[in-house]
Structures are given as structure tokens and as C-alpha cells.
Amino acid sequence: MTSKASKLQPANDQQGRHRVPVQLIYASDSLEPAAGQSDRHVLGEIRFESTPTTLHREDINYPLVCVPIQQLWEPLVKEYWLSPTPVEYRQQADIRFSNNDQVLFGYTHFTLPTNGVSLEKQIRRRYDAMLALLQSQGYAHLMRVWNYLPRIGDEIEGMECYRRFCRARHDAFETFYEELIPNLPATSVLGTTGTDLQIVFLAGRSSLYHYENPRQVSAYHYPLKYGPKSPLFARATLVRWNREDTLFISGTASIVGYESQHRGDARAQAEEILRNIEALIAHVAKSIRMTTPGLGGIRQLRVYLRNSGDLGTVRQIVEGCLGASAQVVYLQAGICRRDLLVEMEALLGLEKPA
Ligand code: 3EB
């Protein structure tokens, strides 16, 4: 069947030119996804390990991100962001990156200063560098950003670390973009037990479609009580490829309007998050005149839990909502508001009708 199917494909599909330029796969330890395959090239790899052992491996040429947060459910997986076409690997200033002709995957990290002013300066510097790199390389459109932030909920010289992060990011984006809101990408910010702020990003050459959630106030319009400068991100980003669209859903919490819901109740928070994600998927589908795939359309879901003891409860809720082929990773991480126990982010592939 495989060979028959491949004969039906256009000849240049062998080089992957018609396939989705960036695809996420989860692999268990034994599997090397790119070994010997001419149509699988690694843009980057993300591992979650409470005590990373392999931050510097000489035999790996692609950006390898080891995030010091614990995976709560076996089998332990690695995330590979794959390209169907060959990839270049480069470094500029403090940013390691890889790219094919349509997508750039980047990674930068630095030890978090303990002083509030230098902390914000450093974050600003890295965001400036990221935006400048994307501009100079011609991948000007940010599609997805992950920020792994140590001490996320700690006060650092009188202001919460996450709020300082938001202010520094705000300054960088505001300075760089003439029009701010249409450029904000899907994003996550989670707390780690490590020493370094780790920033991972995907960017593309052509324009993207960013969405807000009808159940939530846009984060860039949050009231002042959540911090002096609002969090700048979109609730989701849609990338339209030739045959399929990719939908990146941001870290989503149990927030309706702008207020946290169900304090202290992980089960109710998980249910609220899934309602938020479901509404967002329906909203995006409607805008592209497509029947919503619902939560069943989720291919990959990361579930972040503040307390590992909530795993059983949350797993039960999540597994009852997703399709059989969805891949779910459960992680223990810090979450930005003190009253939140759970956060989830998702990736969907929306196939275009033939
Ligand atoms: C929220 O909705 C929950 O600051 O970039 C989720 C995703 C959250 C991204 C960010 C924050 C961010 O406000 C927290």
C-alpha cells in the first residue's frame, strides 16, 4: 500500500516540497527519527528532564533544548520538529537556529540574573536579538514562542518575575513592530526548576493568521492588576500550507474573561481549559469556513500541572475529550498566576478538503 500510494504522489513530493514544512513528532528513547531517511531532517529537539544530562552533545548538530521540568507519565518522549527538506544549521550571536526554505527554528538561553533591572535588560536583549535575526534571515513572521522561565512566580526585588518578563517582552515588541497586535504569535510561558531562561521559537517567511479566544479577554487587554505591561501573545496562530494548515494553540489556562476560575480545583480547571480550547478551535474553523474538528482534532497536547498529585484527575478529564490518536505529554511546571494549577497547549493539523 505504501508503494502504491507514493506512486500517486507528484514526483517532486519525494523531495518533500509539497509536504508540511514543519511537523512535530514524539519519539520514545529508542527511535532516531531522522536516521537514514532522506525526507526527515531535524529542525530541533525538545526534551523535558528534571536534571538534564546532555546539554552539550558534540554529536548533535541541531538545536537541542533540554528543559528542566519533569515529565509525569511514561513513556518518556522527545519532541522532534522535523522538516521534509534538508536543513541548514547556524548560530548568530547567542541564538542557535536551523531552517529550511520556509521555517526557522531558534533557541537561546541565559542564566537569569538575580537583580530585577538586569533581568529585564537581558530578556529585552534576547528578544531584540531574536527579532533582528528573523528580520535579517527573511523569516519575519513569528509563529510560535515557548518561554521556560525559572522563578516564574517569585518576587524579584518587589515584582513578580513573570511580570518583569512581560514588561521586557512588551518593550521589545513595541519597539520592533510598527503594528503590534497583528504580529503577536501563539506563546507559552512556564516555570522551570532550572537556572536559565530558555526561549524557543518558530518563524516563517509568509504571513500568518493570529486568533483570540471568544471566551477570553485578549491578554494584551488585561487590566493593570495583572502587571504594569500586559502579556503580548495571541491565543492561537494558524499557518496555511499547501495541503494542510497547522494550528498552534497557546498555553491556555482556566481563565474566562480575564479572571482565573475554580481556585484550588484542578479538575474544574482542566474542564474549563478544554472548553476554552474547544471554543478557540471552533472560532478558527469558522473563520476559514471549515467544520470544526473539535477537541478530537488535537494531534499533540502538552499538559502542565503545578502539582504532580493532580495527574490522575486531570488525565481522566483529558483522555475523555481527545481522539484516540492524540499524543499527550504531562509535565510538572510553574504556572504564571498563583491561583492556576493547570495549563495546556495544543497542536492541530487541519487537512484541507480535496
Ligand atoms: C493566560 O492566559 C495564562 O505571557 O505569553 C498563557 C500563555 C499565559 C502565554 C504569555 C501567558 C502567556 O494569561 C498565562
Image: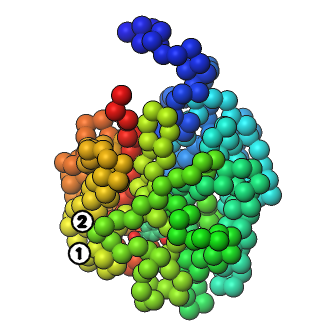
Write the residue at 59% across / 34% down.
Answer: 83
Within the image, what quadrant is residue 276 found in? bottom left
Where residue 31 appears, x then y in whole percent?
Answer: 51, 28
Relative height, residue 7 to residue 55 (above, below) = above
Q: Which mark is residue 262?
A: 1
Within the image, what quadrant is residue 119 found in? bottom right
Q: Label 1 amino acid? A: His
The residue that disc 2 covers is 272
Q: Label 2 amino acid? A: Glu
Q: Quadrant of the N terminus?
A: top left
Q: Are marks 2 and 1 in contact (CB under 8 Å)?
A: yes
| Disc 2 within 8 angstroms of ligand 1 (CB) | no
| 19 on left or right of 65 | left
Where residue 260 appears, x then y in whole percent?
Answer: 31, 77
- State the SS at label 1: loop
Write the residue at 52% across / 16% down.
Answer: 10
Who is closer to the viewer here, 35 or 121? 121
Neighbourhood count class around disc 1 (C-alpha, 10 Å): few under 14, some 14–19, many 20 upward: some
Within the image, what quadrant is residue 341 found in? bottom left
Ligand 1 is located in which of the four quadrants? bottom left
- State the SS at label 2: helix
What whole-number distance in Å separates the C-alpha atoms at marks 2 and 1?
A: 9 Å
Who is closer to the viewer here, 328 or 196? 328
Who is closer to the viewer here, 308 or 287? 287
| 168 on left or right of 160 | right
Q: Quadrant of the C terminus?
A: top left
